[in-house]
Every structure is written in structure tokens, then in C-alpha cells.
Image (cartoon, grey):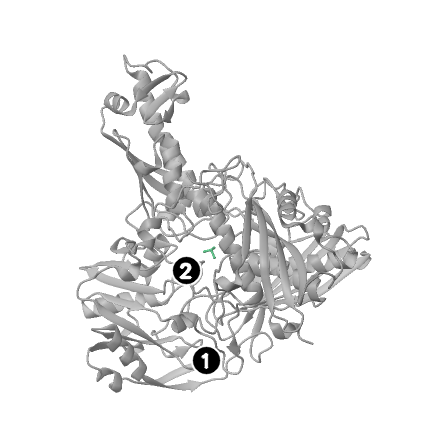
Amino acid sequence: MTMNEAAPPAKENMGEPLPRIDARLKVTGKASYPADIPVNNLAHGMLVTSAVARGHLTSLHLDQARAVPGVIDIITHESIRDDLETPEFGTSGSTSIGPLRDTKIWHDGQIIALVLAETIEAAREGAMRITADYEAERPSTSFGSEGTETVAAAEASKQFKEDVKAGDFNAAFAAADVKIDAEYEMPTQHHNPIELFSTTAYWRGDELVVHEPSQNVYGWKVEIARQLKIKPDQVRVVSPYIGGAFGSKGPITPRTAIVAFAARRLGRPVRCVVTRPQAFTTQTYRAETRHHIQIGASRDGKITALKHEGWEVTSRPDPYVVGGTKTTGLMYDYGSVLTKVFLVKADRPTPSYMRSPPETPYVYALESAMDEMAVALNMDPVEFRRVNDAVKEPIEGRPFSSRSLMECYDEAAREFGWSKRNPDVGSMRDGDWLVGMGCATAIYPTNIAPCAVRVSLTEDGRARVQTASHEIGTGVRTIAAQVAAEQLGLDVSAVEVEMGDTRLPPAPVAGGSNTTASVSSAIIKACGEIREKLARAAVTSNDGPLAGRDPHSIMLRENKLVIGESSQGLKDAFKQLGAGVIEQYSEFRPDAASEEAVSNLYKGKLEMVSGDQGKKVKYAFGAEFVEVRVHRRTREIRVPRIVGAFGAGRIMNTRTARSQLMGGMIWGISSALHEATEFDLRDARVVNRDLQDYLVPVNADIQDVKVILVSETDPDVNPAGVKGLGELGNVGTAAAITSAVYHATGKRIRKLPIRIDNLIG
Ligand code: MOS
């Protein structure tokens, strides 16, 4: 295999950088994304969305739309009324807001109609000709808007449970030698995957088939069935390829059941592709957050007190909690900890998961404050982390299963050349550019969930892995093939993988970076059972090279059963078994999950065991270093280089791991300098609802991105030894950049994104 920067050589406890097995299909256009599936007699749907954020729809004017040639039907609240159950928030659903059930408007851009037509053009034309009258009320948009309601997250949400705390923060903070007290703000963000959101639905008698990009096909199947008042067995959700998700395709949104309803009413398939602007209000997004952090430390740099309070904007009806204090509360050896999370209810859609949902905003705030404290202590920021590095988490004193934080700092610092940094603010220059350097910690919990797989092995050494897991671009399809090949002693080219269909064995939501660990653990179990069957047949046969040997010591290697110097071909072993194929169905249940966790998986109810549960806490760590350049006159901000080092247990494939971490860091740069969903505060409407105005980095913004994979072995996390890393890379990046901007300019910007105008004057 060719090694290069994109395919780093595997170090200890790392898998080879196998190219993605679906890469060729994707780049040649042969991979069919859900909206590409050819369907006969298709009707096209176009959403119509509200122009006010709060109030009631009083009338819809449909005549102009009905007059458009090709328009077949228009679905409104008059059509649906009680035919659909209201969506449910919390399990698989993104929101309890049910458009088209009645006339109530909960947020800007809420679905108020679905136009169905023979062509997409006719549907769009029809949608544009619909006008509506509203009884509008004055909406509340954000923090500080009149009419918002603030509630404690722990009281409002079943999922969040409680605020973490330890020791006596107030006393410790009062007694601290050095104190930091600062507030940080992170804006609303929208995922904007390149693949647009879409639903294609058709019925075969009483059976519904839905093609839609999804991170949770089993969960969706159950929720779609509930809304349509049919049985889950009547619903199939298909999603083999997904063009970017980042959490946005995790919770089901209300559109899906509406499109399925339309297909039933029309008696023909319906496809609805959501436009880019419509996705800003009909899909989920990252909640806007504010943070108040207080840190107290002794003169020698030991933290004695941390307080982290968070405020998060959510919708009126749904208590979605970001809740990153569970992570920030245990990151360092603080002495005492006090945290509290509040929800601020406003007239917005319900927010939801977006890559490292809790960690991105909360760690941004904490790591920014850590840098401020290092400055206040006149300490090197890396040394400040070292002094406060934790062996045990500070809340209950449980050990970390492994923690390579300082190894990551040391390796990344060496590669970056941190020792050449002059700590004095504004001291480093290159011509007209002020140079700044900063660093921050990345952290992400190691989550794991139940997962079922079917692995088949034929006598001629071909294997197939089937699981309803989701390849959202992370590389899990490739890793599944690698794991099966390794376990069964085959070449990876002999393994086929099927994913993304509720006809396959159930897998958990592709969320919380659990997928590689959960799917790999299930495959390891299934392959172990296959090996066991073959080994037993080989040792119990009367003749043959393995007769009478210990079956547990037999391994599968290169299409053979092997023990010491003896071996037997796979074909002969199958003959002794009297079979042509072994089809092994296995269910993996994490140790800490309940007895019902697996049966719940079939019911679309996920039991994820999170990294902060259990006798040991399980987290992946990293350290990121950035150089920024701020132009002396124009204040243009550039990031010429970023280096990240990460320790995340077994790395299954160094190519896909690097790709995930690199993508994460790029998104981190985006968080720091580009992204924000802007609201008009008067009417709670999104202003920049397209990729022209919602800024994301382009090639010119991203220069040298270096990923270092740090060897780490952690047998405690799960049978695969894997810590998820899909959401690790974008944690902390924004704080590293704001710290570097401070180092360059002396300006401490506590509100993201940093814009040129923040640095003028
Ligand atoms: Mo990830 S935001 O948990 O899909």
C-alpha cells in the first residue's frame, strides 16, 4: 500500500490505511444517494414555509398554485388534520412541533404546505405562487429578547438529569490567589451537508418504503410508523449512502411523515428535496449558547475552583439540552466544581445535534478561559494544562480508562515548534503580519451502543457483513470490511458490506461517535462465533491435521484454520462441518447497558452507554496548536497552519481516522472565523439562509493541516478497543484560534466568530 500524508503508516495499535471501499463508487457517481434512486411515476413535492415566526395561519391562497400546469395536489393542514400523530421530541424525533396538524406557527420557516406536481419545476412554481395570511404575534428570538422563558435544564429535561458539582466552589474561589471571570458566546450554526435533505416515499399496499439520508434508520422506522398510525414492520427506511450528516440526519424531522402521507393520498411515489434555504428552518441546527466561567488557582498554577454556567436557546415546546458541563466539569483536576445549565425558550425551531454537540461550545468556553488563566498566571499554556492534568475525574474520583492528553500536547508541540513561540503579546511579526500562536485541548466521550450484525462466510472464503449501520462518510463501511477480514483471516477484497437499510440487523444511531466501536465490537463477536464453529468441526473430526487439538487456540489466517505449525484449508473445515456457508447473526451488548438494551434496539429505542458512565470514565483526547496571522493594517485573519495530535484507543484505519480529524479541525477553524446563523432579532427570521451568506471555509482559507495519531491502547473501553474520533477534531480548535489571535494582537475576543471588525480600533 502506498503511504503518504493522506495514508499515514500505522503505528502501534493501529490498522492499515486501507482506501475506502466505496470511494470509487462515490467519485464516479455510481453510489446512489437517496434522492438519486430511480422511481417510476414519481410526483415531486416542494415545501412552502411560513413567513412569520409566531402566531397562526389564518388563510392559504392556493388557486394560483393549482392553476400551474402539472400541479397535482397541495397538502395543507386541511388535508392532514388528525390523520398523522404529532411528532415526538427526544427519542428519535427532533421536535414535537407538528406542521400541518393545525394552524399554529411555532417558528420562522415552519412547513405550511406541500405542493405536489408532475415535475420539480411545476412543484416549485406552485409553491412560489402560494400566499398566506397570518395572525402574527411578536416573537422572541434570542438571549435578552422580550418574552423568552429561562428554565433550569436539569428540571426541564429527562435526558440531562443533573448539573455536576464537587467540593465547595464558593469557598475555594473566594480563597484563590488568581481568578478569572469571563463570559463567552457561540452563535447558532447550521450543518449544511453538501447533500440536500430529501424524502422519497412510496407504498406497496400497506407497506411504506422511505429513501432518505439518515443516521438512524431503525429509530426513524418506528417514529414514522407511529406518526402514520401503522406498525413499524410496515415501514422500511433505506439510506445506504449519505452525503454528509454531522448530526443533521440523526433525529427525524416532521417532513418525512408528511411526504409519506402525501404518497399514500396520491397513490404514487413522492419525492421532496428540501432547498438549501428551507433547510435552515425545517432541519435541526446547533443551539446558540452563552457561558460564564470562573476559575480560581493558586499562584503556582494549580486550579482550585471551576464554575461553568451555560445558557442555551431552545424552542418553546422542547427542552433540548446541549449540556457540555458533563465534559468540562471533568476535564482537569480542579479541586472544586460548580456547573449549571439553563434553557432559554424562544420562538425558534428545536435545535439538536451538530458535530460534538456539547463539547464544541462548552470546551470552546472552558479552553478560552484556560488560556486567559495561563496569561494571568504568566505560565506557558501547555505547562498550565500539565499542572492540572487529571488521573481521576474530579467529581466522583473515578479513574480515566486512559488519557493521553499530555502525550498529545508534547507530540503536537514538537511538530508545531511551540518552543519557538515568544510568549509576549504582539511580539511576533512577519512583515505586515502579526503572528500569534495558541493551543487548546480536544476531548470527546467514548460512547458505545448495542449493535446487531449478520456475518456470512462461504467455503471459498468470501464474507458478507450486514448491519443497518450508517456510512455518513466516516469510513465505517471500510472499517467493517477490515475488521471482518482480520477476524476471518481473509483478504479485505473478499468482504462485502451492506449497510443503511432496516431490512438488515439493527444498529444504533450514527451519533456520539459510537459507530466504529459498536459495529466493530459486534463484528468481532460474530466472527468469533464463526471461528468457533469451524474450529470445533476441525478438532472433533476423526482425521485431518487439527483433529484433537484445542479449538480455542485455532485462528483463521489466509483462508486457513491455523494452530502452531498445523493448518487446514477453509474448504476442508466446511466439509467437516457439513456446510457450504456459515451465517452468523450476533448481537453485541455493552457491559454497562441494561438487559433490555438489545431488544430495545429492534424497537428503535437506543441505549447508548456514554463515556461518563461506569467505574472508569472513557474519553478520547487531543491537543491542537494553531498559528494565526493578522494583517497589521487590514486586520485580515489567516490560519496558515494547524497541528493536532490525538489519542483515541485503537485506530482502525489511519487514513479514515486522519481524514475525520482533519475535517474536524477545519470545521473548528470555521467555527472560529466563519460560521454563524444570523437572525433578525425583530422577527426571529434567519437572514443568511444560503451558502453565499452562511460562510464556510474554502480552500483558500485552509492551508497546512497536520494530524498526528498518538498510539494508545485501552482494553477497557469496548471489545474493539476503539474510542470514537469523528467528533474529536473540532473540539477546542476555536479556543486555540482565539488564544492565537490574542497572542498576535492583545485582543481577547469572547464571541464567535471572530470578524475583522472585532480587531479594528
Ligand atoms: Mo453526531 S452530531 O452525535 O451525529
Residue 714 image point, x, y percent:
55, 37
Q: Is mark 2 within 8 Å of ligand 1?
A: no
Q: Which residue is found at the position 80% from the left and 50% from the top?
A: 300
- Indicate left or right for 359 with 244 as reference: right
Quarter of the image with the C terminus is bottom right
Mark 2–mark 1 Cα distance, whole angstroms, equals: 23 Å
In the rendered image, which quarter is residue 543 located in?
Answer: top left
For disc 1, the neighbor class at 10 Å (few under 14, some 14 to 19, many from 20) is many
Q: Is residue 308 visible?
A: no
For disc 2, the neighbor class at 10 Å (few under 14, some 14 to 19, many from 20) is many
- Indicate left or right for 140 with 229 as reference: right
Q: Which residue is found at the position 35% from the left and 47% from the top?
A: 506
Residue 710 image point, x, y percent:
57, 41
Residue bearing mark 2: 251
Q: Is residue 656 visible?
A: yes
First reached walking from the N terminus: tag 2 or tag 1: 1
Instruction: Determine whether the residue tagged by mark 2 lies in a helix, strand or loop.
Output: loop
The residue type indicated by label 2 comes to: Pro
| Residue 135 vs residue 244, the one in the foreground | 244
